[in-house]
Amino acid sequence: MGWKQGVFGSERPTREQWVGTLVALAVLALVMAGMFVDFAPAPALRGVHMAVIFLIVGVIETALLFAHASRRGRMGQLVDKGFLKFLFLLVAIPCMLGFVSWLIAIKTLPWGITRVFGSEVRERHVMETRHTRSRRSCDYRLSGGPMEGAFPSYLCIREAFYHRHPDRQVEVVLTGRRSALGFSIQHIYSQE
């Protein structure tokens, strides 16, 4: 089996298979970038209203995927898995696609635009250090300030920074770039 067979499912992939694979890889790269950047979106890009908007986007994207599957004659494969699995897909796919769309549109792309076109800033904030055991994220966190209402609502900090200021409020200086889309945080400095 050659690499084309492994990637596309065919030794002679169609143009649609090439484009679909490249789009999927680009989306995956944007999602991965969005998960690891320190970015506080502008207040207008946060809140319940944005969650509702992107849930609707996820529903629309799911409908488009199901329409595509129906045109290709693959809808039967989804329905034949059983009613409960199909019902789960109807709930899970819109949520997942909405989250992925939100991550790209509200975090990754604004972060990239802010990093390129934003102005350099140094801001003082009073934030709180916290220690939380986490297998999926960082154990030492700084919350509040510009991260309040953002997702996630904290910045990861080093263990040494936390031990200098354990579980308390601390004045910090955040440096980075700011634009109308938000604040890309590059460095955290303690004032003490």
Image: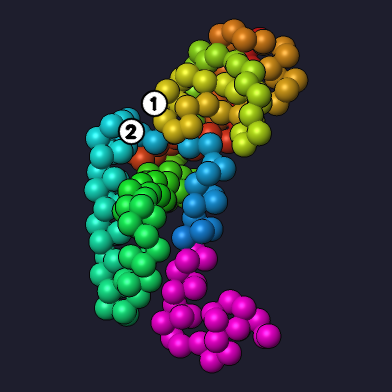
Residue named by callout 1: 149
Residue 113 shows in the view: no
Rate crowding at label 1 as few (under 14), some (14 to 19) or many (20 or more) other CA atoms within 10 Å: some
Above or below 170: residue 8:
below
Identified at 51% across, 87% down, the residue is 13
Q: Position of residue 78 (x, y in %)?
A: 36, 66
Rate crowding at label 2 as few (under 14), some (14 to 19) or many (20 or more) other CA atoms within 10 Å: some
Tell me which numbered mark, 2 or 1, is placed earlier along the sequence: 2
Judged from this view, the residue extending furthest toward the right is 160
Judged by its main secondary structure, the magenta piece is helix
Residue 49 falls in image quadrant: top left
Relative to residue 159, is residue 56 drawn left or right? left
Does residue 7 belong to the magenta stretch? yes
Residue named by callout 2: 46
Total number of numbered discs in the rendering: 2
Disc 2 to disc 1: CB gap under 8 Å: yes
Which sits in the foreground, 1 or 16?
1
Magenta region, residue range: 1-26
Residue 165 falls in image quadrant: top right
Identified at 28% across, 32% down, the residue is 48
Mark 2 residue type: Arg
Does residue 144 belong to the magenta stretch? no
Q: Position of residue 189 (x, y in %)?
A: 63, 22
Mark 1 residue type: Gly
